Structures are given as structure tokens and as C-alpha cells.
Image (spheres, grey):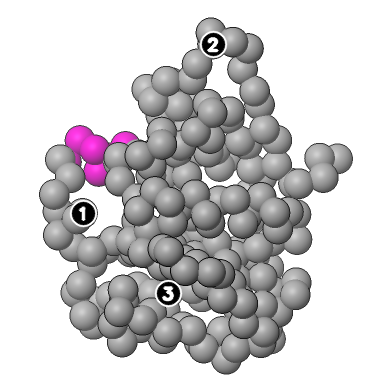
Amino acid sequence: MIPSGHLTLKFRPGLHLSDEDFFWLCRANPDVRFERTADGELVVMPPAAPDSSSRNAGITAQLWNWNQRTGLGVVFDSSAGFTLPNTAIRGPDAAWMARDRWGSLPQNERERFPRICPDFLIELRSKSDIKKDLHLKMREYIAQGARLGWLIDPKTVTVEIFRPGQPVEKLTRPATLSGEDVLPGFVLDLKGILFD
């Protein structure tokens, strides 16, 4: 068994998984989640367990409903991938991007893994995730342009809030989370997500 719940493949020097190769690998294996690190390593993740999947669906539904009311942007679920400025291709559990930023992308990029970092994202820790790895991912998102990120951990019943240029804020058993000025008026109800 792999301790972190996922497999990371490192390629020998000189061998590189191009954007095109990565795209076709994902297309050929739709039931497997892949990410590519900035170092070119391929990360293979198993499908989500039903418990995590249900919690994630609750997150995405609330974000989508708020966005439908406001029309401020575009919501993405865990199947979306984004090519960050550092060349990593990442797929947060939920993400949101302002409408004007999404609209500025050419249509052909929207159909692949667009070269842009979401404005807001959420990572939901599953039982197989190593917290240190998730912290590195969250810091990467912020360094690559995200304006707000939440790491939700049902195992410890905590949420860590990541913002550019600020220390990480840790909350224990919060009932709700505010989207602050990034998602005006958005409040995530954590019942059924962080705790039952």
C-alpha cells in the first residue's frame, strides 16, 4: 500500500511528459485523476471514496448555487485541471474564477487544461491524503496566483485559510466560512462537510 494514497512517478532525466502527452493520458484514462508537478512528476490518484465524494459534492453545490445567484464567475468541480504558471497541472477539489478572467481565455484552452490559476479553490482532505502534501499544494496555488484557498480537514475538524502575503489562519470546528472579498456574499455551511 502506498502511504499517501497516491502514486508519484518520476521520469528519468531527459524524459518529459509534455502538455499534449498529459492531455491524451487523461483522455485515455477518464476514471483516474492525474496531476503533474512543476518538476514534471506524474501524480496518480485513486477515485474518491464515497464519503469524500459526498462531502465534495456538498461544497461544489453550495459554490455553484451562490454563483448562479450572483453571476460573478465560473465554478469548477474536482475533474477540472489547470496549468499553473510554474507548469504544474493541478485539479483542486472545487474552484472558482472571475468571469472576466475565464472569458479572456481562448476556447481551445478552455477545452484542455487552461494556463491560468483559479481565483479561489478548496482542497478537501481525504483519509488517504498526507497533510504536508496538501499544505505544499495550497502554498503552490497561492504562489501561482490564487487569491483565497481553504484546506478543509474532516479528520481533525479544522479549516486552514490561505491568502497571499498572510500567515495561514487555522479554525477549529467553524460552522461556516466566508468568501471574503474574493467571493462577495458566499458563505459555506460546513455541516455535512467538516462534521456531521
- Residue 28 at x, y percent in the picture: 48, 28
Is 16 drawn above or below residue 19 in the view shown? above
Secondary structure beneath dot 3 equals helix
Quadrant, the C terminus: bottom right
Q: Are marks 2 and 1 in contact (CB under 8 Å)?
A: no
Write down the quadrant of residue 183 in the picture.
Answer: bottom left
Is 10 drawn above or below residue 123 in the view shown? above
Taken as a whole, is the magenta stretch helix, strand or loop?
helix
- Residue 112 at x, y percent in the picture: 32, 37
Q: Which residue is mark 2?
A: 15
N-terminal of the pair, mark 2 or mark 1, is 2
Q: Is residue 75 left or right of residue 135?
A: left
**Label 2 CA crowd tier, 10 Å (few <14, some 14–19, many 20+):** few
Residue at x 25% of width, y 43% of height: 110
Is 177 drawn above or below residue 5 in the view shown? below
Q: Are marks 3 and 2 in contact (CB under 8 Å)?
A: no
Q: Is residue 30 left or right of residue 86?
A: right
Quadrant, the N terminus: top right
Secondary structure beneath dot 1 equals helix
**Label 3 CA crowd tier, 10 Å (few <14, some 14–19, many 20+):** some
Amino acid at dot 3: Ala
Q: Which residues are magenta?
A: 107-112
Q: Which residue is mark 1?
A: 102
- Count the marks: 3
